[in-house]
Image: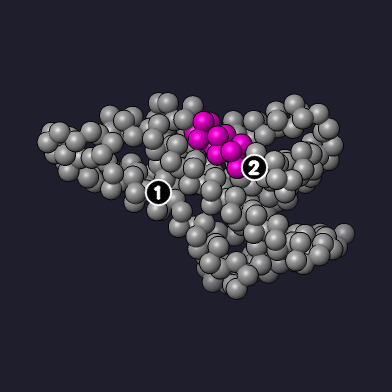
Amino acid sequence: MNFALSYILIILTLLLARREGLGNEAEIFISSLRSALQLMALGYLLRYLLGISDPVGVMGVVLLMVLVASVIAYERVRMRGVFMTAFLSIGGATFLTVLPLLWTGILEPTAHQLIPFCGLIVGNSLNSVSLALDRFMGEVRNRREEIEAKVALGSSLRTAMDEAFRDSLRASLIPKINFMKAAGLVHIPGVAVGMLMAGADPLEAVLFQVVILYSLVFAGLLGSLVMLYTNYRRVFRYL
């Protein structure tokens, strides 16, 4: 019942939007209901998923996350071959990030830790690879004549695209770097907030948040690298 009272904040938002004539009150209302239903469904689903004790079952859940993320990445571009390269990029980045953490004991091989953690990595890797590929396509489109000229002079296509590669990778890292700069000064990141509200030791909470931040940066860059290296020829032909 107490959680339902939080809907007062949405009602106040609707009143403010109406007062300012934003015209998006229906969208806010529908989105608020949709998010509540989706998250409640997720809560019931997690009751089952977090109870999985079979490592193969946990691996299957993670692969399903990667599969869905790959579909979303493909839908943003709809370029042939992107689905498989997105699956490789996001899946590879996720597993290569998680394996060292399991080996060092930072993460335990349980559904309770692996499924939420991998969900974070997969979601953020999706954002990074999508941002990198979108920026790369724009760079190639704008620099096409320059790239063709370099190839005509004897450069390989990869070398001719070097500046587009670097600019795209930098762009994919900007949100992660800004997030690291602001963490602890401008805001307390979400995972640490959740652990603190659950009663965890503050130092333990912030140290685990640091692990997550470092993991997101590594996975984001690795996924973006794989995405661009497996698609640069395809992008050049597509455009």
- Classify mark 1: helix, strand or loop: helix
> Looking at the image, is 22 positioned above or below residue 48?
below
Q: In which quadrant of the rendered image does the N terminus lie?
A: bottom right
Amino acid type, residue under disc 1 in the picture: Leu
Q: Quadrant of residue 208?
A: bottom right
Determine the residue located farthest toward the front in the rendered image: 104
* Residue 94 in magenta stretch: yes
Q: Position of residue 145 (x, y in %)?
A: 16, 41
Q: Position of residue 193 (x, y in %)?
A: 73, 63
Q: With 201 as the anchor, is 13 left or right in this view?
A: left
Q: Position of residue 131 (x, y in %)?
A: 44, 47
Residue range corresponding to the magenta coloring: 86-97
Q: Which residue is mark 1?
A: 169
Q: Which residue is mark 2?
A: 100
Name the residue located 83 percent from the left edge and 32 percent from the top edge. 53
Say which label, 2 or 1, has the lower sequence index.
Answer: 2
Residue 120 in view, yes or no: yes
Q: With 222 as the anchor, is 165 left or right in this view?
A: left
Q: Quadrant of residue 230?
A: top left
Residue 26 in view, yes or no: no
- Classify mark 2: helix, strand or loop: helix
Q: With 52 as the anchor, is 237 left or right in this view?
A: left
Determine the residue located farthest toward the right in the rendered image: 1
